[in-house]
Image (spheres, helix red, strand yellow):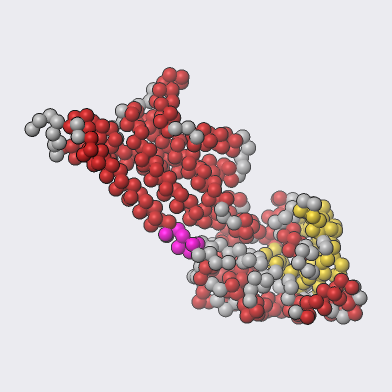
Amino acid sequence: MISVSGLRKSFGAATVLDGVDLEIRQGEVVSVLGSSGSGKSTLIRCINGLEKIDAGKITVDGFDVSKPRELSEARKRSGTVFQLFNLYPHMTAVQNIALAPVEVLKVPRKQAETEARELLQSVGLTDRADAYPSQLSGGQRQRVGICRALAMKPSYLLLDEVTSALDPEMTSEVLSILAKLAKGGTTMVFVTHEIEFARSISSRIAFLDKGTLIADLPTEEFFSDKGMALPRVAQFLSKMRKD
Amino acid sequence: MRYGDFTPFDIVLLLQGLGVSLALFVSTALIGLVIGTAWAVIRFYRVPVLMQIVTFVAELLKNSPVLVQLFLVFFGLPAFFKINVTPTEAAVITLSGNSAAFIYVIAVSAIESVGRDQIEAARVFGLTRWQTLRWVIAPQAAAFAIGPLTGLLVNQLQVTSLISVIGVMDLTKVGNILNLRTLKPFLVWTAVGALYYLTAKLVAYAGGRFEKRLRAHTAWRGL
């Protein structure tokens, strides 16, 4: 279980997260919605320890991410996929995926590379396994990014606006893979602007507004009366649907 | 044949001088590379005290003339520390230290030019600081550094000529001797200059080749 309680984070004078409580249990797909600047990405970056938190507590399977010693254990349990892919440009797709399993989990290289190829096959990139990131399209890069996170066999997948840098066609490539993962029971925290997609795969929706969680509801309740009763959510959804 | 004429043996003499210059250049470049990189790693880990010392020493070496450093080592070590150094030892110590200081600067800026996103991608999957440096930062930093490094090495090759003043028999010293004997400075220094030129070109060519290989996949990074 990922447990976030009383999380506060500010950058200088700007408070980005102002007392967030959130729990994600094994098997859930939780989408985090909210307008730009509402703190969605920061929330993910706090969970995987890329940002130091100012107050509150975050644990991943009981490991406190603000304690350096426990952070490495927490990180082994979650896999992050980045908005801008962040692939290592000097490594092939297979090498990108196998690096962490070999170095962190001490999987033998041969085995790690075989598993990397299997993962690439599952996302339809069998023939691009030995290509470098610069030789891949955006959608292909993000699929490699997803494989890289999955290679660590994480209990939780943290997805930080993974389709924001992609065109609609590439977005659907990536989303179809995520849908497959969600169906397979992968636990996900999904920060996104793809509302309709979030609705189709999520078990719960969390809505962030100016650093506070103003809604944390089962998906269908969020999109029906209960969510709409919140003026900020209603406004957000109506704006997004118009586009 | 008069004493002042050129003899075929002079060519051997020139090549010997070139050999000494090259040997000094290669050895001090390698030592400088090891020390400079080690200093950059110390800075990467922000080792307290050591980091301040490294920064201070590098600043001293960068901002004073090599010739002055050479005199300090050659005349200063025996005078103040009672350590006797041969001209060759003094040359190796000075040039290595000087190269190290400049290589340190190149290495630090190369490390810093690797994007934060790369470091985050490595850290988030649990790689340690060392593993991140070794597998993610160093290969990319090397690709950034190789261009400035080649420029530096070409310059350091020319700088080796300074050591002739303390009596090391390098190419410049040989040129000096031939010049005094034949009194044909234009011929002698043209030959010496051409040898430096060719060697420098060779260094630049090798650097260029190496850069192409390192940058094969990173040059065009796309998004």
Instruction: Tell me residue B133's x, y (percent).
Output: 56, 52
Instruction: Tell me residue B38's x, y (percent).
Output: 51, 42
Query: Residue at point 59% right, 61% down?
Result: A100
Q: Is residue B87 above or below residue B210?
A: above
Displayed quadrant of residue A26: bottom right
Where's the C terminus of chain A, which quadrant? Answer: bottom right
Does residue B103 appear to the left or right of B24 in the view shown? right
Query: Residue at point 88% right, 77% down?
Result: A228
Q: Is residue B122 magenta?
A: no
Instruction: Tell me residue A214's x, y (percent).
Output: 87, 67
Where's the N terminus of chain A, which quadrant? Answer: bottom right
Residue B17: in sight, yes or no?
no
Please name whichever residue, A4 or B12, is drawn nearer the observer in this view of the structure: B12
Residue B92: in sight, yes or no?
yes
Displayed quadrant of residue B136: bottom right
| Span shown in magenta | B212-219
Query: Residue at point 51% right, 74% down?
Result: A128
Q: Is residue A172 above or below residue B141?
A: below
Query: Residue at point 70% right, 56% down?
Result: A50
